[in-house]
Amino acid sequence: MKAILDSINYRIPKSMRSLMGILVVLFVITGFVDHYFFSFDSIGNTLQIAAPLAIFGAGQTIVMLTGGIDLSLAMTATGAIYLISVKSSSGLLVAITWAVLFCLIIGAINGIAIGIFKVNPLIMTLSMSTVLIGFFSVGISTFLKGSSHVPDVFVTLSSGYIFGPVLSWPLVVWFIVATLVLFLLTRTGLGRLIYSIGDNATAVRLAGVKVWKVQLASYILCSLFAGIGGVILGGQSGAVSIDLATSLLLPTVAAVVIGGTSIMGGMGTYTGTIMGALILAVISYLLSALNTSEALKQIIYGTIVLSLAWTYARISTNVRRH
């Protein structure tokens, strides 16, 4: 038995074991607060809440590993599902094409501005988010006027169950996204470059790598995953509004940093982000069971991000000194 435990401890990093421990503790506490939480129905609902957050976290993890961040993610997600809803009258293939092109364009603009023109990622993506808010606010009543109802096929994809109350379609989509991201970051040259750029972009550039191309690819991938998450989120709500994904922007960043990805870049895993998303999903359920407001939830998410950002900054400073 001791040999088995030693093998598990060797294979699972200490940080991951800590996250698992936190998740278990939160699970037990939430179960005591609301006994219904231990039911399969409740667990299935919690996993459905975690799915879009973790899918958003996939893109956010990639760009944060390069030392960047994407604050336009929420509006990209909203824009993608809104275009699908409005253009669905022309056929699903046409609607999906519009959404994919939209995500590609937003990701490309962010990537070019940050990679080639050296615009600060926070400023660039925050500005892009503001532009998109204005664009869709005007478009909803003019050139993009149409139905805000999400097509039934995406409602089923976002909230339908395959087997029992736990295995649902959003989990299948999440599993596919997780598999792709884990393969990208651990088994491809692009993944290694993403980590390297976050660790030391200057050294990578001097080695002959076109850093801007990697950043461009990272922001395009982030926008595409935002679009997928937006489809899941929109399908779960059944209709699209301009603030559909706004409340998930800060939790997305929180999930990534809780999972151990450094805001400074170069360190982290998507496995950690998955754990972070699950932890936040359980916290969200717990806070809802305690009848807390959405504002308090945002305060808690913001506190988590600030605390971990300060911690990573201190660690980075200590490393440079030594």
Image (cartoon, rainbow, N blue to C red):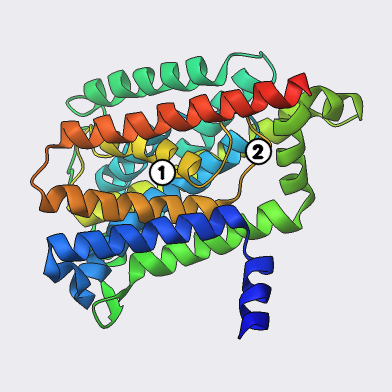
Q: As drawn, which residue projects farthest toward the front?
A: 2
Label 2: how many Cα within 10 Å (few below 14, some 14–19, many 20+): many
Q: CA distance from mark 2 to mark 1?
A: 18 Å
Q: Earlier in the sequence, mark 2 or mark 1?
A: 1
Q: Which residue is mark 1?
A: 99
> Toward which corner of the image does residue 43 lie, by quadrant?
bottom left
Which residue occupies 70% across, 18% down?
116
- Residue toward you, 262 or 170: 262
- Kindly tell me whether residue 35 is visible in this rendering: yes
| SS type, badge 1 | helix
Image spot of residue 121 (x, y percent): 55, 21
Front disc: 2 or 1? 2
Q: Is residue 60 above or below residue 289?
A: above
Which residue occupies 37% across, 41% down?
80
Q: As drawn, which residue projects farthest toward the bottom?
A: 1
Image spot of residue 143 (x, y percent): 26, 27
| SS type, badge 2 | helix
Q: Which residue is mark 2?
A: 217
Image spot of residue 134 (x, y percent): 29, 18
Which residue occupies 68% across, 52% down?
185
Image spot of residue 96 (x, y percent): 40, 51
Amino acid type for the residue under numbered disc 1: Ala
Amino acid type for the residue under numbered disc 2: Ala
Which residue occupies 65% across, 33% down?
66
Q: Quadrant of the C terminus?
A: top right
- Kindly tell me whether residue 95 is visible in this rendering: no
